[in-house]
């Protein structure tokens, strides 16, 4: 075998090695992207539940008999309806999908904010196995379909004082 033939085989071996390495890196990058999106998805579920819980705390602690939703997300940071300031959130979390704090707002009939949603139009990975509170998220096909809304519990029916004989 001549020297030029052995150099040709070495060159061919290096080309095959580079192609295999490129294919492996492509697969790894795809897997990394999936892992990153699943981590952001879990963060979205946590952040949405946190905001929903804060909206619920604001709503339930409304002074008087008429319950009100917060007029904005900022009202959750500084609830000034009382003499002492109450804080339902320390800070408004970033939307993990967009990495911004510009949440979409679900507006209540009274004009307040009753929930939030992501503005991301990416397709979801998680389609099942949600908690009871989040079971409605299973029908969403994009993250903007996931609505984290506080809905107050229905008041229980009053019991009558009549005796049954």
Image: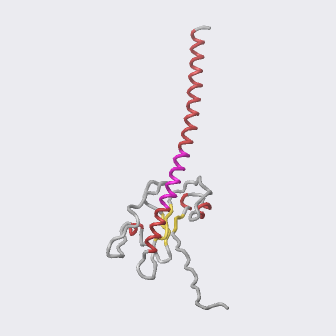
99 versus 51 height, above or below: above
Q: Is residue 46 magenta?
A: yes
Q: Residue furthest front?
A: 165
Residue 100 x, y percent position in the rendering? 43, 56
117 up-or-down from 108: above or below: above
- Please, what is the dominant secondary structure of the magenta stretch? helix
User: Which colouring convention does the figure follow?
Assistant: secondary structure
Give the residue at x 47% y 54%.
Answer: 96
Residue drawn at x 55%, y 61% is 146
> In which quadrant of the rendered view does residue 93 lie?
bottom left
Q: Going by the image, does 90 lie left or right of 17? A: left
Residue extending farthest right? 165
Q: Is residue 101 magenta?
A: no
> Which residue is depicted at the point 56% across and 30% down?
21
Asked whether, in this view, residue 9 is left or right of residue 82, the answer is right
For the C terminus, the image quarter is bottom right
- Which stretch is magenta? 33-48
């Amino acid at each position: 075998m001549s020297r030029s033939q052995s150099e040709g085989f070495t060159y061919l071996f290096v080309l095959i090695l580079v192609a295999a390495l490129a294919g492996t890196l492509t697969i790894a990058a795809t897997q990394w992207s999936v892992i990153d999106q699943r981590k952001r998805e879990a963060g979205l579920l946590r952040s949405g539940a946190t905001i929903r819980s804060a909206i619920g705390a604001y709503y339930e602690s409304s002074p008087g008999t008429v319950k009100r939703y917060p007029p904005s997300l900022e009202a959750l940071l500084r609830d000034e309806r009382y003499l002492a300031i109450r804080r339902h959130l320390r800070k408004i979390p970033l939307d993990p999908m967009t990495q911004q704090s510009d949440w979409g707002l679900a507006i209540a009939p009274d004009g307040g904010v009753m929930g939030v949603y992501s503005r991301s139009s990416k397709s979801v990975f998680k389609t099942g196995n949600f908690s009871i509170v989040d079971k409605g998220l299973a029908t969403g096909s994009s993250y903007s379909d996931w609505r984290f809304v506080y809905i107050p519990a229905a008041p229980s029916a009053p019991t009558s004082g009549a005796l049954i004989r």
